[in-house]
Amino acid sequence: MSTNTLDIPGYKAGTWVLDPSHSEVAFSVRHMMISKVRGGFGIKSATLTAPENPLEASLTASVDAASLSTKDEGRDQHLRSADFFDVETYPTIEFASTGVRVEDGDFLVDGDLTIRDITKPVTFEVDFGGFGSDPWGNYKAGATAKTVINREDFGLTWNAALESGGVLVGKDVTITLDLQGAHQA
């Protein structure tokens, strides 16, 4: 809980619920040390509880691990297997914020990310897109958030050595969230 307050034009206190048709979780990771593979997940739910002071807000989110897609079904099946996400045993990826802060002009959301029942602290750097009403009278907010994790910290350790040196899959994974939520009052 912060003792400071933050004024964000257009901000409204209350509960904000994710609009899944206008939101996505994307990731990228080095492949063969020469390029990146990109993919995404479907978001099951996300709720932002927003008090008068935005620095006291809290967020919970759940991602459907089996929804993983990299646009290559063979790779997707391997990523869903026990070598990686083991979606049969661990069907969701969870996030729960632990704090909100502004540091050097950057808006940061700290929280606990859980993958394969392993929970680690992460910090997302957030870029607000703004606020506005849609044609149906819903008040919406948009934001992009980004962080980098070491996949091995979450038990995602499978890899293969390359004949040319190095490994098939990089350790660092960039996670990018493009989010839109609706104010519920």
Image: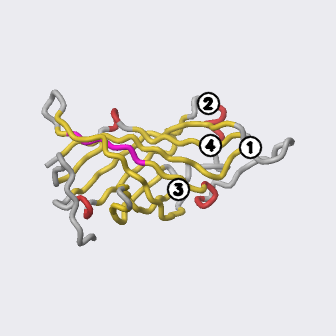
Residue in the image at 41% along x and 48% along y: 145
Task: Kindly indicate the quadrant of the structure image that contains residue 136.
Answer: top left
Mark sitting earlier along the chain (1/3): 3
In the image, residue 19 above or below residue 58: above
- From which residue to which does the magenta span run? 140-145
| Category of crowding for the residue at label 1, using alpha-carbon neighbours closer than 10 angstroms: few (below 14), some (14–19), many (at least 20) | some
Mark sitting earlier along the chain (4/3): 4
Q: Using the image, tell me which numbered label, if any, was put on residue 131.
A: none
Which residue is tagged 2? 73
Q: Nearer the viewer, mark 1 or mark 4?
A: 1
Q: On the picture, is 158 further left or further right than 8?
A: right
Q: Position of residue 128 (x, y in %)?
A: 31, 45
Residue in the image at 37% along x and 62% along y: 103
- Nearer-the-camera pick, 116 or 113: 113
The amino acid type, in three-letter code, at marker 3 is Ile
Q: Nearer the viewer, mark 1 or mark 3?
A: 1
Residue placed furthest toward the front: 104
Compute the Cα span from label 3 to label 2.
Answer: 21 Å
Q: Is residue 144 magenta?
A: yes
Mark sitting earlier along the chain (2/4): 2
Contact? badges 1 and 4 (CB < 8 Å): no
Which residue is tagged 4? 79
- Nearer-the-camera pick, 105 or 134: 105
Q: Position of residue 94 (x, y in %)?
A: 44, 55
Which residue is tagged 3? 115
Residue in the image at 49% along x and 59% along y: 114
Contact? badges 4 and 3 (CB < 8 Å): no
Mark sitting earlier along the chain (3/2): 2
Which residue is tagged 1? 168
